[in-house]
Image: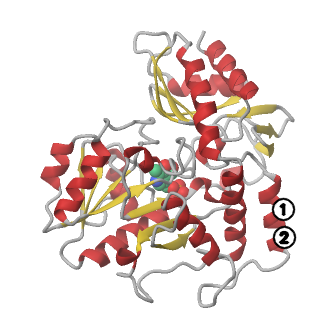
Amino acid sequence: MTTPVHGDKLLMRTYAPVRVRFVEGHGSRLVDAGGRVYLDFLSGIAVTSLGHCHPAVSRAVALQAGRLWHVSNLFGNELNGPLAARLDTLVGGGAPAGGRVFFANSGAEANECALKLARRYAGRGRHHVVSAFGSFHGRTLATLHATGQPDKHEPFQPLPEGFRHVAYGDLDALEAAADPTAVAAVLLEPIQGEAGVVVPPAGYLAAVRELCDERGILLMLDEVQTGLGRTGTWFAFEQAGLRPDVVTVAKALGNGMPIGACWARAEVADAFGPGDHGSTFGGQPLACAAALATLEELERIDAPARARERGEQLREGLEGIAALSEVRGRGLLLGAVLAADGAHARHAKAVAEAALDAGLVVNAPASDVIRLAPPLIVTEAEVDEAVAILGEVLG
Ligand code: PLP
């Protein structure tokens, strides 16, 4: 355990006691309070895709911090429009997609926007949203109910009404749940990150798109964890060959600056009028400056190609570790599954802790899964180093 500092005890106990306190980070490396250097293969949970303190983002933030931080959305600023245009073009695969964007401060808020938009678009009475068991969409009361994890719901009942859950990847179950007289939208992650990097069966998402089209139901994809290059394409939905009606992003958008966004087709977005939704901070200049610099740099380095290349190397390396039974995921969002008959079976948390002790930052989203989400700027040598550390920990 790390040495306590003044005030630690005053923090609400929503997280387990921490083992390490980081004080500095550059690229793929983090430094703890004792000066020890770690290799970061978690990136603040798929956030710092450009690595810690990327000079281009730090510079943009520093410049903006000396110019204008915040004005509220009662007034215009010069950065939220250009950022919306950049996102819209990414959603469109390089050409404008014809959507509109609402800026928020987190993934949960981006999804909260999507949920409210679905209700406004479909109209009163047709407000249900179908999401998947195992999913994670956030911690606000509505996104918590969209999150398909009943054990997380339990302490906070009653939750906002209007959510149905089906098995992820089960089209028949979705067909049965998606009653077009009651359901406004289907909300899915293209890969379930928090469930342990779960990839749906081939063809599932395309079939969901078809079902939604047939029934006039919105398809909303939560790309908060998968988006912006991490899975080897700008958005994971590209690999399914479809375009959703609504896409949410956050995590990597600001490379660590809190910012989220909800993109929607213009016809859907236009269901919102002034006063329907809002945010004090959403789209403020400082956060937008970070996001613009982040997207510019991700595009400049062709982040999706990096994720594919280094992801392949990481996957191959992990597949050589005997204690692992499977490596799943895409690009640089990988879940290493501990063999059920091995010495580490279902002890992913202990493995992640041992990796941390050995200088590698990863985490355990499920009892049998180690998640690896290194920055997309990770080098070939760093991938080899991480595989070697994990191989030793699991040896
Ligand atoms: N959606 C997905 C897919 C996520 O992985 C997360 C966070 O892990 C969220 C939403 C919530 O994002 P935030 O913690 O920024 O509210």
Picture quarter with the N terminus: top right
Residue at 71 percent of width and 41 percent of height: 377
Res 59 label: 1
**CA gap, disc 2 and disc 1:** 6 Å
Residue behind label 1 places its C-beta within 8 angstroms of ligand 1: no
Element class at badge 1 = helix
Mark 2 crowdedness (10 Å alpha carbons): few <14, some 14-19, many ≥20: few
* C-beta proximity under 8 Å, tags 2 and 1: yes
Which residue is located at x 75 percent, y 77 percent?
Answer: 69
Q: Disc 2 marks which amino acid?
A: Leu
Residue 385: image quadrant is top right
Relative placement, left or right, of 211 versus 362 is left
Residue 240 seen from this side: yes
Compare residues 128 and 88 and report the one nearer the observer: 88
Residue placed most toward the observer, 300 or 216: 300
Quarter in which the C terminus is drawn: top right
What residue is pinned by disc 2?
63
Q: Is residue 139 above or below residue 280?
A: above
Residue 307, position as x, y percentages in the image:
60, 38
Residue 362: in sight, yes or no? no
Residue 90 percent location from the top left of the image? 54, 60
